[in-house]
Amino acid sequence: MNIHWDSKTYTDHFSFVAQYGSGVLDLLDLPEGSRVLDLGCGNGALTRELAKRGYAARGMDASAEMLEIARRDAPEIPFDQGDATAFALPEPVDGVFSNAVFHWIDAVRQPEMLACVHGALRSGGQFVFEMGGSGNNTLIHAALAEVFAKRGLTYRMPFYFPSIGEYATLLEKAGFRVEYAILFDRMTPLEGENGLADWMKMFLGVPFAGLEEETGEELRREAAELLRDDLCRDGRWYADYVRLRMKAVRL
Ligand code: BEZ
């Protein structure tokens, strides 16, 4: 994972991430009581939603800080610390759900992650997820590349945003049958008058590693200014999200 989470700021100001995940939950078509793993559950907001829908939900995340919040808010749900690319469950589950997680995992590690999901599911089990897809945040990353370049710096985009074709191929190779796939734009409103710069600060740690805090602030401000015409409307900032949403069945 290419991030260390500030779990409090994330929970207080970026809760839209979970709000959008409920449409992905609708793809699960399992009877009440089915065992469902929320992979990369973060603060557990959507694990609680799975439980509300009648599933025997459990969550897994790499971040101890996020899990602390998840356990505090739902002590009755089991939450385990684990790496999405190297985990095994004691018992197979009927469904695996994941929202806004897989783009944090480098492309070369995706097959390992899919092998773990395959191993965690019973035969016929359902795998539903949403992640950043091909073209996600193109405007934001292009603006950052431009302001980095002006200072002679190289901007490294730290995410994996696949197309439908690319990810369907990985799923098929990993032993899944793809049942549903959609790639769609979601212009996403952000909070606050510095919404876009704050979003960059929250989610884009890796490209700024090693830079002075003040340099980072300037770069984020300059990039946001370049994007004002495209991503700020009536004083409200937006992020140019593109989502890849899929459902696959374990063969
Ligand atoms: C996303 O959910 O697509 C995303 C969030 C933060 C950084 C990059 C992508």
Image (tube, rainbow, N blue to C red):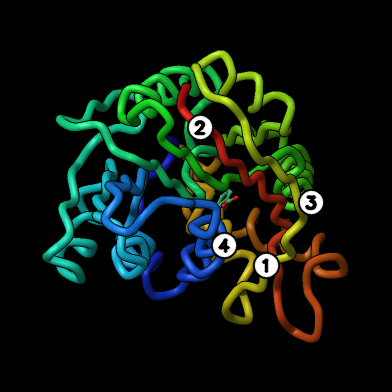
The residue type indicated by label 3 comes to Leu
Dot 2: what SS? strand
Q: Residue 244 appears in which quarter of the rendering?
A: top right
Tag 3 or tag 2, which sits nearer the N-term?
3
Mark 1 and mark 2: Cα distance apart in space: 30 Å
The residue type indicated by label 1 comes to Thr
Mark 3 and mark 1: Cα distance apart in space: 13 Å
Which residue bears the numbered disc 1? 188
Numbered circle sitting on residue 23: 4
Which residue bears the numbered disc 2? 249
Mark 1 and mark 4: Cα distance apart in space: 15 Å
In-front residue for pair 71/217: 71
For the residues labelled 3 and 4, say whether their Cβ atoms are less than 8 Å apart. Answer: no
The residue type indicated by label 2 comes to Val
**Crowdedness of circle 3 by 10 Å Cα count: few (<14), some, many (20+)?**
some
Dot 1: what SS? strand
Closer to the observer: label 1 or label 4? 4
Mark 4 and mark 2: Cα distance apart in space: 18 Å
Dot 4: what SS? helix
Numbered circle sitting on residue 110: none
For the residues labelled 1 and 2, say whether their Cβ atoms are less than 8 Å apart. Answer: no
Which residue bears the numbered disc 3? 139
Closer to the observer: label 3 or label 1? 1
**Crowdedness of circle 2 by 10 Å Cα count: few (<14), some, many (20+)?**
many
Dot 3: what SS? helix
Tag 4 or tag 3, which sits nearer the N-term?
4
Who's the residue at 47% across and 21% down the image?
251
Horizontal arrangement in the rendering, residue 222 relative to residue 122 (left or right): right
Q: Residue 167 appears in which quarter of the rendering?
A: top right
